[in-house]
Image: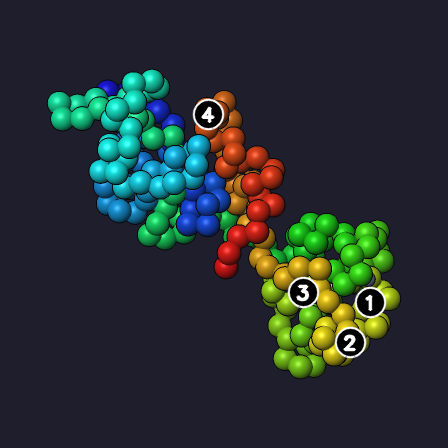
Amino acid sequence: MEMVLSEKVLVLNRSWVAINVSTVRRALTLVFQNSARIVSPSDYSTYDFEAWVEATQAAKEGKRIRSANFSVAVPEVIVLTAFNGRFTKEVKFSRRNIFERDGNLCQYCGKKFDRGELTLDHVVPRSRGGSGTWENIVLACLDCNIRKGDKLPQEAHMRLLRKPVKPAWATRVGVKIGRQRKQSWERFLEEAYWDVELKE
Ligand SMILES: [Zn+2]
């Protein structure tokens, strides 16, 4: 039992971003406090402890937590429910990160440019009260920037490639996984997962 409780668990924040590696002991405490739910890595369904016991008590394979009253699969991934995690590193609102988010693509014509040929465009122009935020700053090539001028995209008959949002990937850098990495964590850490558009 002791050894099992020291097993590693991947902790996801409310946005399903991996933020920490903890232990089964700590993970179960969070689940008992209703601060987290256990995640089934195969289909992303989440469970409170009771439901987890129900779902896994019949299975025999894999590591188990056994007590007098129950035998249950060892959780490998949990998702926080109560707050977004004090381990979360905020993605820095920087030029570099905006270029990274937009992939050096002009967000109006969709073409790829060298850094020097791209500018930061306020979707809602500053003269109209537009702010310097993730949601209002996009990369634009010089042509598109001039064409858009002080207009809103729809006024200039231009469309954004996609709605600009604050990226979630900065937290990825904050997680040190190392050698303790488990197979079941892969899909929460792999590149494709980070490209999934998160709902605000
Ligand atoms: Zn352009």
Horizontal and vertical percent for residue 90? 52, 52
How many angstroms separate mark 2 from mark 4 (CA)? 50 Å
How many angstroms separate mark 1 from mark 3 (CA)? 14 Å
Which of discs 1 and 2 lies nearer the camera? The answer is 2
Horizontal and vertical percent for residue 29? 25, 38
Q: What kind of element bears circle 2?
A: loop
Q: What kind of element bears circle 3?
A: strand
How many angstroms separate mark 3 from mark 4 (CA)? 38 Å
Ligand 1, seen in the image, is in the quarter at bottom right
Which of discs 2 and 3 lies nearer the camera? The answer is 2
Q: Within 10 Å of the Cα at label 3, are there few (<14), some (14-19), or many (20+) other Cα atoms?
A: many
List the residue tagged with mark 2. 156
Q: Residue at x 56, y 41 (%)?
A: 193
Foreground pick, 107 / 121: 107
User: In the rendered structure, which amino acid carries the disc numbered 1?
Assistant: Cys
User: In the rendered structure, which amino acid carries the disc numbered 4?
Assistant: Lys
Q: Disc number at residue 182?
A: 4
Horizontal and vertical percent for residue 153? 72, 73
